[in-house]
Image (tube, coloured by chain):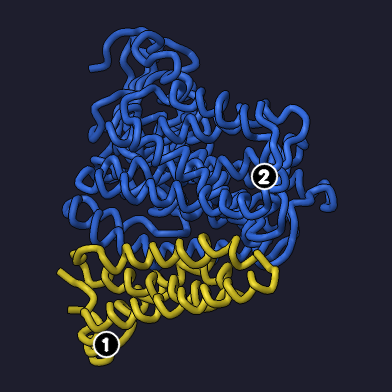
Amino acid sequence: MFRLRRSIKLALALTIGSGVAARFAIMVSALSGGDPDHLLSFPLTVIFPAILAGLLLATRATRSREGALMRLGTIIQLALIILLPPVALYLALGLPVVFLVVELFETRLPQPLRDPIVRAVLA
Amino acid sequence: MIDIDLPREWLWALRWALFLGPLAAVLLLGARHRHEPRVIVGGLFAFLFGFAMIFATHQLAIAAGWWRYGGDVLMVMGLPADIWIGGAILFGPVLAFLFPTIRPLYLVLPIILGLHGMVFSSLDPLVMAGPFWFVGVVLVFLVAHLPAIHLARWTARGEHLAWRAALLALGYGFLAFYVLPSVIMLAMGGSWNLGARPLWLILAGLPVLAACFVLGLSAVQMFVVHGEGTPIPLDPTKRLVRTGVFAYLINPMQMSSALSWIVIGVMIGNGWVASAAAMAWVFVAGMVRWHHRHDLLQRFPDGWPAYRANVPEWLPRWRPWVPEASRLVFDPEQVRQAAFAAWLYRRDPVGLNLEAQPGVVLTYRDPSDARDFTAAASVGKALGHVNFAYALLGAAVLLVVLPLRHLRGDEAYEPKGEPVT
């Protein structure tokens, strides 16, 4: 069974939490300036990806290594969606690329390079 | 009918609630059903179906002037994405999880008559009702919400496989070929304005698009008929499907999607939509191969490796790969049956034995399958043994004949004749 290392999970949770906090601050600032757009987009563009990332972080170990890596890739993509709102739509449309990257990583990267990286992120 | 002016802040709160309310509900209800995977998968299918069909029906409503949404935040072709997704969650998995035994029609009727009837015209400027808005609401419920709840329920109970697969195919069709191109054009620019494109291009594109759809839909049908499952790995087939279009290529659905995106992109003159075909390749390379290794190879260790070794992923074989010969039994005294058998014989069908037996209805029998295909259905199946072009023709025949027989009841309308030995 494969799962993300606790340190990796913590780093991801902190990154996503910081992103949510930053977006919240931007929303409050914009609202005090009379602009409700950030308020209206907050649930879909911040809360929703954060919840999805949280669910992926909380899920149990996977049977395959690729499964765990795909989960990691998706969480990173969700974190980027929260952190980079101007390109969030492009990132969402490009989600399948995460799976391709994992497949290439698993099938094409030389083992001496691949294994240390996997050991660093998966337990 | 209530007709009040809500303060702006209330409308902001309402918009939050319309998204976060269903989201919170589905998380709580999903957690309650977390040990029932079929219920969860049913909820997911209901959401995806509703997601596609809500968009399609709302586009119709907006075009017909039944209603329109105000504001410019998160708008996708005039539809606020958060309200759209919230609606797909609420009128799909949430209602299906919350009321698993109440008939879906009884579930949605009070919502149509009560909630929408009472408050729809009070939501200006969030949504501005036009004439005949009630017709639009009924249409959205009939086409999007009601089938979504049925899909969730049927998937959870593992019943009505053919209807389930049909709804999944319909939902996927709208999702892949209407919602996705619309979102791509939102990001990259472009529009569905076909009126500005040359007529000959549209007319030339439509038959090609139809052939692509036949390929994809036939794959779904083969999964149902021969695999006793749906194309979605979360609701998988019980048997490895290697017949029909699958005898020519491993990924007919992905191939169909990729070609359709290219054709649609050419028809509307949008390279970005056409380039979605690359995403289909990315999906196969990244996700489907992984699924093949970790699911199909595990479940079908005898059949999958030989199939994988003989059938290409993308570029179809011209002649099919048939591991076990099927039979086409015909009555030599029936002129049309005999003529069809002779026509087939001249084309040297792969893995198909032609057998004459007086008095029978034209019957196709696959040794790996418990059921027979008779009359027009047997013609469709037999054509699949000639070459890829005829296989597509046969697939089109089966896409018409088998659903019609299913609708009328297979047994009652099965052609009668001597039993095939």
> Of tags 1 and 2, which is closer to the observer?
2
Q: Is residue A117 left or right of residue B380?
A: left
- The blue-coloured chain is labelled B
Quarter-of-image position of residue B115:
top right
Image quadrant for the N terminus of chain A? bottom left
Amino acid type at mark 1? Ile
- The yellow-coloured chain is labelled A
Residue B30, image x and y in percent? 30, 47
- Residue located 56% across and 62% down the image: B277
Q: Is residue B396 left or right of residue A57?
A: right
Circle 1: element type: helix
Q: Is residue B62 above or below residue B404?
A: below
The label shown at residue B6 is 2
Residue A45, image x and y in percent? 53, 65
Quarter-of-image position of residue B157:
top left
Image quadrant for the C terminus of chain A? bottom left
Closer to the camera in the image, B182 or B394: B182
Residue B47, image x and y in percent? 44, 45
The label shown at residue A117 is 1
Q: The numbered mark 1 sits on a residue in which chain?
A: A
Amino acid type at mark 2? Leu
Circle 2: element type: loop
Number of numbered markers: 2
Q: Is residue A40 left or right of residue B224?
A: right
